[in-house]
């Protein structure tokens, strides 16, 4: 038994030694295949680097390869299917056999290492790029052509100095032609005013640039107003895609991946924007980095730095938060009559015929923009100053100077009103300040005053602040909206927390529409008269909704005691008011002296009150809180001539 076992063991050992040379031969064959593949990747790629050939990497260490195909240069990520197919095809052409999958994977890993370690660093673009003062637009066609744009004109080139990558779903752009007119585009868009058409064209011109910031285009309107078609047509002129319109992503990671793989993000049929997606769209519009954990790792992150044009469509106005409204353009579409409606097949067929000349006209505008951009000097720069300057630089090709900025400022004013009406705190403050010149106090006092103005349904809303800290956060968010509506918001720094609200003059609103204003003396405004004349101010701002140049606080005839202007005008002169010295004034609620402010309600005579007594006195007078925008609201009535209701 032992002899048989020993004999069997010797036989197995001899068989193993016989197989060893064959196994070594297979390993050598594998090594030779890998060497041939990496030699192809370096020598036959489109480049002259001594150690990497046409292999290079981006700033985030992703390997790419410039490959030559039919006398044109194509750029593919090394880990992509396009590079893998090219590598296998060239290997077969040279050797007449196909490499095995294991050798291919090994060669791709080695090529990526060569690209990252030995290759140069370059920037890779999606659809739009820039280099050497010139702009480039990837046509994404089979010839890998691009449009080159500079101050002298635009032209189609085959091997641009910038690298473009092709993502899944990307479709070719129309090949532009010379001699087109931008008015041709208007016949395909459901716009009712010249202002809306100007904004749509300038949004396209901004989206054709390689760098942001890009405004978020919000399309709203009833069913049948061609919102989706409007968005598709705009995208076809910039970044055609198989999935032209998408639904909103469920998480920020999905939004970042979509922005990394496409130039234009278009989201259709939106009913509401949650706070997180609104904030994320703000970052996408102006440019920001997104970080997520790399799959199958614990420590590595994937960093995505993107800035992309965004289109939103919905029946209602979905841009209601202040930060997104400051980065948006809003176009409201009217319903199309059934007798004037065109089928989508007919519309797209006609658009495909005219799109090349429309794109050519847009490129003419970009040539003008490249030429005039260094000369643009806006007196007042809005939030998206780069977009405003670019639109101003391009407009001379299509319209008289100043057309774009007038349309843009009007649109920003509209969005500010929409966002302010949607903000419960901002709307309440606007109603309160409609009959005041200024107000100062701590957040708790302000919350009590606002609670008397707002309706019960508003104060019970989850969006209504329940304490002073929440009010402070809400107030900081809506402060830019209030400033553009003519109400300055100032937060005291250090010491006792104080919030100051002040009506801006017309000059102040023009010079600083969204930033805090500061007086020369830094004197703290107060709605309580100090030394009998603390409320006197010059140049009060016109409340929102009043005709330009009018001031309902002062547009009254002398002697008209029922006019709002007489009620709200400070009545104190040289320390006296109606003959009563300041030292003799008494609070109507507690009958004590001190810092007092005057209040006039309806037909009741004017009274003096401490700040802390105001809420209790109003409750004692059995005043029912009414919505400031309601026709029965005393606050609303105070802004109309012929009434005598107001708080000062």
Image: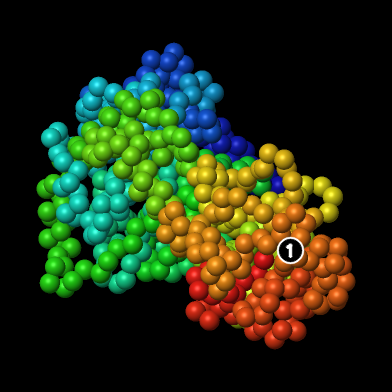
Residue 148 visible in the shown view = yes
Quarter holding residue 515: top right
Q: Compare residues 496 and 296 and report the one nearer the observer.
A: 496
Q: Compare residues 250 and 68 and report the one nearer the observer.
A: 250
In the image, taking residue 92 as reference, residue 180 lies left or right, namely left
Instruction: State whether residue 309 is above or below residue 643.
Output: above
Residue at the image position 53 percent from the left and 70 percent from the top: 560
Q: Which residue is mark 1?
A: 577
Q: Residue furthest bottom?
A: 622
Residue at the image position 30 percent from the left and 72 percent from the top: 223
Q: Position of residue 598 (x, y in %)?
A: 72, 68
Residue at the image position 30 percent from the left and 36 percent from the top: 401
Which element carries disc 1, helix, strand or loop? strand
Q: Position of residue 97 (x, y in %)?
A: 30, 32
In the image, taking residue 415 as reference, residue 10 lies left or right, namely right
Q: Sort mark 1 into few (<14), some (14-19) or many (20+) by Cα contacts within 10 Å.
A: some
In the image, taking residue 142 as reference, residue 254 lies left or right, namely right
Q: Compare residues 188 and 503 and report the one nearer the observer.
A: 503
Quarter holding residue 449: bottom right
């Amino acid at each position: 038994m032992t002899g048989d076992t020993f004999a069997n063991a010797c036989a197995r050992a001899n068989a193993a030694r016989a197989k060893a040379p064959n196994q070594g031969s297979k390993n050598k064959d594998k090594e030779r295949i890998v060497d041939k593949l990496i030699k192809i990747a370096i020598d036959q790629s489109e480049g002259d680097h001594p150690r990497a050939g046409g292999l290079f990497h981006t700033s985030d260490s992703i390997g790419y390869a410039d490959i030559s195909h039919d006398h044109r240069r194509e750029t593919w990520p090394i880990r992509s299917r396009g590079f893998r197919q090219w590598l296998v095809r060239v290997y077969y052409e040279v050797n007449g056999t196909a490499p095995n999958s294991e050798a291919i994977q090994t060669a791709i890993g080695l090529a990526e290492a060569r690209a990252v370690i030995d290759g140069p660093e370059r920037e890779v673009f999606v659809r739009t790029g820039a280099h050497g003062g010139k702009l480039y637009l990837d046509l994404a066609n089979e010839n890998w052509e691009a449009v080159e744009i500079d101050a002298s004109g635009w032209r189609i080139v085959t091997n641009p100095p910038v690298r473009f990558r092709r993502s899944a779903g990307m479709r070719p752009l129309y090949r532009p032609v010379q001699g087109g007119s931008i008015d041709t585009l208007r016949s395909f868009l459901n716009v009712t005013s010249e202002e809306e058409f100007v904004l749509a064209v300038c949004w396209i011109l901004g989206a054709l640039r390689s760098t942001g910031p890009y405004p978020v285009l919000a399309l709203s309107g009833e069913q049948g107003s061609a919102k989706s078609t409007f968005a598709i047509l705009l995208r076809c002129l910039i970044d055609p895609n198989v999935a032209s319109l998408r639904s909103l992503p469920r998480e920020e990671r999905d939004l970042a991946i979509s922005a990394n793989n496409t130039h234009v993000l278009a989201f259709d049929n939106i009913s509401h924007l949650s706070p997180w997606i609104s904030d994320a769209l703000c970052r996408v519009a102006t440019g920001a980095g997104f970080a997520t954990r790399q799959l199958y790792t614990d420590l590595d992150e994937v960093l995505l730095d993107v800035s992309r044009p965004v289109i939103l469509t919905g029946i209602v106005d979905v841009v209601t938060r202040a930060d997104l409204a400051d980065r948006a353009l809003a176009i409201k579409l009217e319903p199309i009559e059934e007798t004037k409606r065109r089928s989508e097949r007919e519309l797209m067929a006609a658009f495909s015929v005219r799109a090349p000349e429309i794109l050519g006209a847009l490129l003419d505008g970009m040539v003008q923009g490249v030429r005039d951009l260094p000369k643009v000097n806006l007196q007042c720069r809005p939030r998206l100053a780069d977009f405003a300057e670019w639109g101003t630089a391009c407009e001379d090709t299509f319209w008289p100077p100043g057309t774009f900025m007038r349309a843009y400022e009007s649109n920003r004013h509209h969005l500010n009103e929409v966002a302010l009406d949607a903000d419960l705190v901002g709307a309440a403050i606007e109603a309160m300040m409609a009959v005041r010149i200024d107000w100062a106090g701590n957040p708790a006092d302000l919350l009590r005053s606002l609670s008397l103005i707002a309706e019960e349904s508003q104060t019970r809303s989850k969006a209504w602040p329940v304490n002073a800290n929440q009010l402070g956060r809400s107030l900081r968010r809506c402060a830019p909206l209030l400033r553009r509506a003519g109400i300055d918001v100032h937060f005291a720094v250090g010491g006792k927390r104080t919030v100051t609200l002040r009506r801006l003059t017309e000059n102040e609103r023009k010079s600083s529409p969204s930033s805090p204003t500061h007086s020369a003396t830094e004197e703290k405004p107060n709605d309580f008269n100090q030394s009998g004349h603390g409320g006197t101010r010059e140049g009060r701002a016109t409340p929102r909704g009043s005709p330009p140049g009018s001031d309902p606080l002062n547009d009254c005839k002398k002697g008209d005691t029922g006019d709002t202007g007489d009620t709200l005008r400070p009545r104190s002169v040289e320390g006296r008011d109606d003959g009563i010295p300041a030292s003799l004034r008494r609070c109507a609620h507690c009958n004590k002296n001190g810092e007092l402010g005057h209040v006039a309600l309806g037909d009741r005579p004017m009274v003096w009150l401490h700040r802390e007594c105001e809420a209790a006195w109003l409750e004692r007078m059995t005043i029912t809180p009414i919505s400031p925008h309601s026709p029965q609201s005393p606050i609303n009535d105070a802004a109309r001539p012929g009434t005598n209701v107001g708080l000062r």
